[in-house]
Image (cartoon, grey):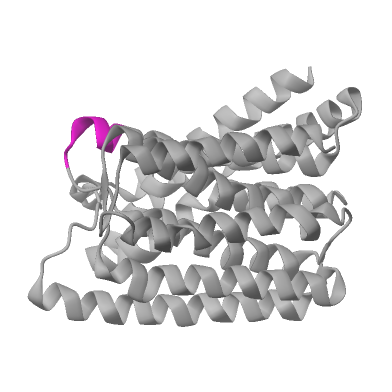
Amino acid sequence: MSILFIFLGLVLLVVGGEFLVRASVGLSFKLKLSKMVIGLTVVSFATSAPELLVSIQAALNGFSDIALGNVIGSNIANIGLVLGITAIIAPLAIDRDFYKFNWPVMMLLSVVLYFVLKSGNEITFWEGIGLLALLFVYLYLLIHRARKMTKTHPVDDGVDDGLSKASNFKIVIWLLIGGVALYGGSEFLVTGAVDLATTMGISERVIAVTMIAIGTSVPELAASVIAALKKEKAISLGNLIGSNIFNIASVLGITAIIQPIAVKSQEVLTNDIWWMLGFAAILIPMAFLPRKFEIGRIKGVIIVAAYCIFISLAFLGD
């Protein structure tokens, strides 16, 4: 039953996330927001909704390891699995914005998260406020930089124009479907994960950092692989980096404001977060050595192999 619950939970999260993105974009057009702002902020928030609902549900039910493991594991999966597989299919081009802005912000937030957790073994209400404040600073700088860039180079913002014609009724229905599916999916996923961990004698932390994390990263993986196979447009490394930034600042920030997140397993600090920092840090040498501004197939294979080692060690070390 626990496997069925996990499967149902993941399906509902994917469906709910898709409807929420549609509704959010449609509503943003009604509010006369520019496509650029929608692409950089609204879509990013909506695609982080599965992680957010799972973390809030887990924290409220007293499973802090799942709330933390979900975010840390998702950030590892976004690089080790999503970026790695995408690079194997089609080499990833790296733009200046990656190493001058997005990567430093992701690295800074990752280090901030480590020190926040280490200092008091929890993310408190006020630390949650601080993480959200950092997110708003990042969004302000992101929009400011994008506006300057679009004056010289038109940017593909990846926003579906067709959603601007969506009726108010459709938007409300999409919001309802998205909200109910996300809530139900998070309930099923957390319940199934806890049951599976108990039955197999595996810690909730390991289930969260592996299975749940991969599950909540499935939408990013599907979108990236489809884009790579179709060769429609350059796959933006910035999207994955942005997802990691949102996971730390918005998912953990909002969750901690609702319910402080305690570190129950010390392995989060002694193992998991170091893997997250390692996967984030390795992107800079990968971007420049030996071939500059590209993450190709060989580098992709190395990243995926490292991710497989992480997953193996997570289960073996439990």
Residue 28 position in % (x across, y down): 33, 62
Residue 173 at least partly seen: no
- Residue located at (18% from left, 45% from top): 233
Q: In this view, does 202 lie above or below 143?
A: above
- Residue located at (51% from left, 35% from top): 14
- Residue located at (82% from left, 38% from top): 317
Instruction: Indicate yes or no whether the magenta region holds residue 202.
Output: no
Residue 112 position in % (x across, y down): 65, 75
In the displayed structure image, the side of residue 149 where residue 240 appears, left or right: right
Q: How many labels does the image show?
A: 0
- Which secondary structure type mostly characterizes the magenta part of the structure? helix
The extreme front residue here reads 290
Residue 293 position in % (x across, y down): 25, 59
Q: Is residue 300 above or below residue 202?
A: below
- Observer-nearest of 205 and 34: 205
- Observer-nearest of 124 and 69: 69
Where the N terminus falls, by quadrant? top right
In the displayed structure image, the side of residue 118 where residue 305 appears, left or right: left
Residue 58 position in % (x across, y down): 78, 48
In the displayed structure image, the side of residue 151 where residue 50 appears, left or right: right
Residue 137 at least partly seen: yes
Q: Which portion, as a residue range, is magenta? A: 226-232
- Residue located at (34% from left, 58% from top): 287
Q: In this view, does 142 lie above or below 57?
A: below
In the displayed structure image, the side of residue 95 where residue 312 appears, left or right: right
Where the C terminus falls, by quadrant? top right
